[in-house]
Amino acid sequence: MNNRLLLLSCFSVAAHLLLVPPSISQGKQTQLSQSILLLSILHPFHPFTYTSLYSLPLTNILLKVWSTKFTPKSRSNQGPTKRQNDQLHRMKLRLCWAVCALLGLAWGCMPTPRARNIAINGQATQKSTHNPDTPDKAIDGNRDSNYSKMSCSCTNEEDWPWWKLDLKRTYKISSVIVTNRNDSYPERLNGTQIQVGNSLDNNYEVCGTITNTSSNPIHICCNDRGGRYISLVIPRNKSTLTLCEVQVFGRLARKKTC
């Protein structure tokens, strides 16, 4: 399911829990929750406008789950007490905000389907080249992870091998996606640092480290770290750096004005 849809529905339920008193009927609660959602995001310039319309049915489902699965059962026939309702309401709100936060983190890192890979127009270099595996093959748009297909960059075995990309302009980097080789030696990429900086020198900040090569491709969140240069380096001796594809996502950084 679309992460954006889940996130919007989650925040709609959170708004419902925060602003709708638990004492009114379930039907009025749902109507008021939908009104809150529409008022908050149905704005002509809001990017989620159309998605929000589709999130309303999901919001209703979530609210029904809240009411049926999390309603306290009273020992008497008079229903839950006011104290029970208040405790339940606070529990729902905390849980909902926690889920929203997790969805927000996951969605914020993942590129949207329309996101543009800004690495394509960059210029790649590497510390050494295991012919014919030149550095530009890591940004050729071919994500084939089979090294024998000749679409991966590769260095010689050496100390602290690196691969660098000049984006030619300064960007706020949201995420980097690395396609590792999967035919053999995928573990070579373990420990690789993804760095972002504004100089070809060593003035880089680490935005992530590859610690698990069992999944491919590998997603690294950079949290809008600003920079023109992307560097991947293995900080150990006698290592080989092989990259079948590197995708970079972000937006142009605004120029500072006086």
Image (tube, rainbow, N blue to C red):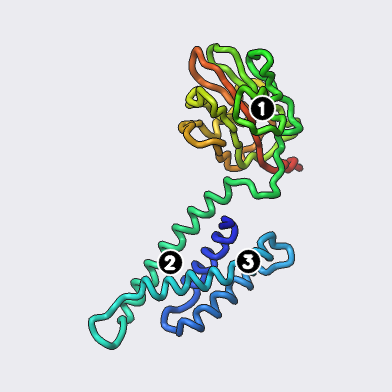
Separation (CA) of disc 3 from disc 1:
37 Å
Mark 3 touches mark 1? (CB < 8 Å): no
User: What's the residue at 42%, 71% (across, down)?
Assistant: 66
Residue type of the residue flagged with mark 1: Ala
SS state under label 2? helix
Disc 3 or disc 2, which is closer to the eye?
Answer: 3
Where does label 1 land, which residue? 138
Image mark for residue 30:
none
* Front one among 46 and 112: 112
253 is higher (above) or lower (below) than 153: below
Label located before the other in sequence (3 or 1): 3
Separation (CA) of disc 1 from disc 2:
45 Å
Residue type of the residue flagged with mark 2: Leu
110 is higher (above) or lower (below) than 77: above
Q: Position of residue 36 (x, y in %)?
A: 58, 73
Determine whether, in the image, residue 83 is placed left or right of residue 199.
left
Where does label 2 land, which residue? 93
